[in-house]
Amino acid sequence: MNYRAKRLEAALIGLAVPEELIDRVAGEINRDPMVSHNFQRDWRPYNVWYVTKASSKEELEGKVKTLADKWGLEYVILYSLKTYKLDVRFDLRRGISRSKLKRLPEDPPHVDALGIPREFFSKVKSIPLVREPFKGVADVLGKSVGETLDLLLQLIKLGVLRDFHATLDGERLGFRENAMVVLRRPECDRAADLDESTHVVLRNTVPGKWEYPCYFMVHAVDRKVIAESVARSFREGYDMLFSVRDLLGGSDMGKRIESVSD
């Protein structure tokens, strides 16, 4: 489910963490059930980056401040202002990510205004591999499978739900590298047009601390493939923050994303 349909706030947090504290700080970050991604990246001063959500900016900023103050850490909070693309697929021949361009609605209706049982949304977040995968969803609504599929398509169009897809373990396919590419200009439309870009998000800047308004991800089998791809599209005005370590864990990440969407 699109978190905006639940009126949640989402932000990417950058923390400046001393090397000897990374594991302990990461463990505390991961205790927040709203954290869906947590990576160590090769950047200074902010070397730990995680995504979390909350019901308000005040709540989100409060929990980040509590954690940072406990460890005496500098940080930046980068809110998601507009999502241009959210799609992760893999080009197995080229060894790099390849995704579809699909602009996401920025103001989907609130789930509570739709008159749809909450159980429906719990059912559709993970569809079983059975002969009639949507029958259980249809039963919750008291509708036919055909009527249920029509409703699902409408909710995807409205931006309440994202499209259905199978989740692949990119690392097992050889895609062990990823880079968070940040642009000094708000060229998110241009970034979203790249086949290789996956998450493309416009975020706030923090004067004197973080001057990059546009962010996108690229995944590949090695760093050279990523660097060459980005250089072909942007000759200047960007930096790449490569992942050093997944501090949450791929399997846990998938479970968290599913849980947070409930």
Image (tube, rainbow, N blue to C red):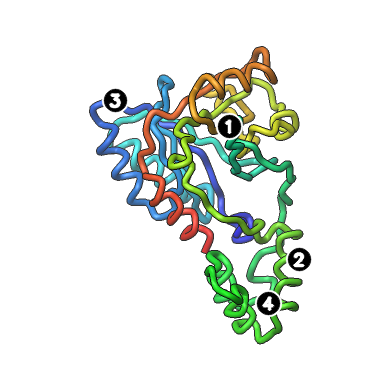
Single out the mark in the foreground, 4 or 2. Answer: 2
Q: Are marks 4 and 3 in contact (CB under 8 Å)?
A: no
- The residue at which mark 3 appears reads as 18
Determine the residue positioned at 69% across, 27% down.
Answer: 186
- The residue at which mark 1 appears reads as 96
Q: Which element is circle 3 on?
A: loop
- The residue at which mark 2 appears reads as 154
Q: Residue 8 shows which numbered tag?
A: none
Mark-to-mark CA distance, 4 and 2: 14 Å
> In the current view of this chain or complex, which residue is farthest to the bottom?
142
Q: Which element is circle 2 on?
A: helix
For residue 128, above or below residue 160: below
Mark-to-mark CA distance, 1 and 2: 32 Å
Q: Residue 115 shows which numbered tag?
A: 4
> Where residue 201 sits in the image (x, y, percent)?
63, 37
Q: Residues within 10 Å of mark 4 (few under 14, many from 20)?
A: few
Residue 125 left/right relative to 49? right
Q: Are marks 4 and 2 in contact (CB under 8 Å)?
A: no
Work out whether residue 232 or residue 152 is closer to the camera in this orientation and state it: 232
Q: Quadrant of residue 166?
A: bottom right
Q: Quadrant of the N terminus?
A: bottom right
Q: Quadrant of residue 184?
A: top right
User: Does label 1 or label 4 sit earlier along the sequence?
Assistant: 1
User: Does label 3 or label 1 sit earlier along the sequence?
Assistant: 3
Q: Which element is circle 4 on?
A: loop
> Where residue 179 sits in the image (x, y, percent)?
52, 28
